[in-house]
């Protein structure tokens, strides 16, 4: 039994690593490889939102049928101590609600959708302009913005240990930037803006979740539908000419559309595998796994993408990741006395609640 459980945990962790790393590398090709894609990052991002929206709709239809055939309880990130092991295992798709779009609900979610569009746009622009090995460093300031907005908007002060962790991340950010040979200022700015919007996204998500009955998949559907409409004028204005130039080349290529679709599926899947990893291990173990994955992802990029490694560049990567991991440990340690019991903390690394490809992968 123990061996079977260990095999399951290992398979979940490996799946998380595979989906996360593959999504970053595939998006990098779509954003910057003109031999495979087109130089239209907004259009690529729009299409990924369309794919996520369609998956939510299809999963909702299947889930509706699954719930008719068996009783279902919503999947929780935490494991309940009094969970009954004898209860029948529900269908995987039973967690997905029926996808409906109501204008009154959509309007209340609209501010979050604007932030969401900014988040995934700057994330993909960052990936387009910086080397993959520098990608995690360029987007490392999310926790800094989290602490800033928590203090500015909620008036909650942070502990000395938290501030030390943030300083480690900031130092790593500048070391990594200084050590990057092919440094891109505009790409780094896009990474910082992505970090800012990721932080705002988490704040707005908590605010609007009650609007959709605290259902993350309903929020994912509304968010991506809204984003699909928001992207259309941006795509037409900034990339309309580029798209028309490729109307008889890339836009009729099966390889291009296959890569686009797979990237969209990976963008949706990252939210699922993240929740599975948290359930199979723990929030802390998930963040350790995410940190190790980010390190491997960056080191692999030196070989796969031919990025030239420098001592300061590698030092910046590990300083940023080390500071982020310490921040996770400190925040989880500080939350336990307040909560009164050792409940798993909510995932602090990824944007699972939006099912977004801009999750911190």
Image: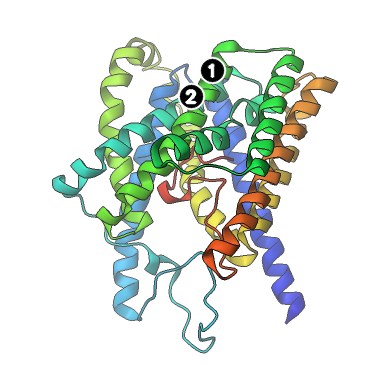
> Is residue 296 found left or right of 219 in the rendered image?
right
Location of mark 2 (residue): 193
Say whether residue 1 is left or right of residue 207. Answer: right
At horizontal 36% and vertical 62% (from top left) the residue drawn is 96
Which quadrant would the N terminus be assigned to in this image? bottom right
Residue 180 in the image, given as x and y percentages of width and height: 73, 16
Q: Quadrant of the C terminus?
A: top right
Q: Residue at x 32, y 50 (%)?
A: 219
Return the mark for residue 189.
1
Point out residue 150 in the picture as x, y percentages from the top left corner: 46, 40
Q: How has the structure been colored for display?
A: rainbow
Residue nearest the observer in this picture, 9 or 291:
291
Q: Is residue 111 found left or right of 43 in the rendered image?
A: left
Label 2 neighbour load within 10 Å: few <14, some 14-19, many 20+: many
Residue 279 shows up from this direction: yes
The residue positioned 51% from the left and 64% from the top of the image is: 77
Q: Could you tell me which residue is drawn at 62 percent across and 12 percent down?
A: 184
């Amino acid at each position: 039994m123990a061996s079977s459980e260990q095999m399951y945990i290992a398979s979940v962790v490996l799946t998380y690593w595979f989906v996360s790393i593959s999504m970053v590398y595939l998006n990098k090709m779509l954003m910057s490889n003109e031999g495979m894609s087109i130089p239209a990052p907004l259009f690529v991002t729009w299409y990924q939102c369309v794919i996520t929206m369609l998956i939510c709709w299809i999963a909702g239809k299947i889930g509706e049928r699954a719930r008719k055939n068996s009783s279902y309880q919503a999947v929780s990130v935490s494991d309940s101590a009094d969970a009954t092991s004898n209860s029948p295992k529900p269908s995987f798709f039973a967690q997905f609600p029926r996808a409906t779009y109501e204008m009154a609900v959509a309007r209340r979610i609209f501010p979050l959708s604007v932030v969401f569009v900014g988040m995934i746009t700057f994330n993909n622009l960052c990936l387009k302009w910086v080397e993959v090995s520098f990608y995690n460093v360029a987007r490392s300031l999310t926790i800094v913005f989290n602490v800033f907005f928590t203090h500015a908007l909620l008036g909650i002060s942070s502990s000395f240990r938290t501030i030390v962790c943030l300083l480690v991340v900031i130092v790593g950010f500048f070391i990594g930037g200084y050590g990057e040979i092919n440094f891109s200022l505009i790409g780094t700015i896009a990474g910082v803006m992505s970090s800012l919007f990721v932080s705002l996204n988490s704040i707005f998500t908590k605010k609007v979740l009650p609007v959709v009955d605290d259902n993350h998949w309903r929020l994912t559907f509304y968010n991506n539908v809204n984003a699909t409409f928001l992207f259309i004028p941006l795509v037409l204005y900034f990339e309309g000419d580029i798209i028309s130039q490729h109307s008889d080349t890339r836009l009729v290529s099966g390889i291009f559309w296959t890569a686009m679709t797979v990237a969209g599926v990976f963008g949706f899947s990252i939210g699922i595998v993240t929740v599975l990893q948290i359930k199979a291990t723990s929030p802390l173990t998930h963040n350790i796994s995410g940190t190790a994955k980010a390190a491997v992802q960056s080191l692999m990029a030196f070989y796969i993408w031919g990025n030239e490694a420098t001592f300061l560049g590698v030092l910046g990567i590990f300083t940023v990741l080390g500071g982020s991991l310490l921040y996770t440990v400190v925040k989880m340690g500080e939350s336990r006395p307040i909560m009164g019991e050792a409940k798993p903390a909510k995932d602090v690394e990824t944007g699972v609640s939006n099912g977004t490809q801009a999750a911190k992968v």
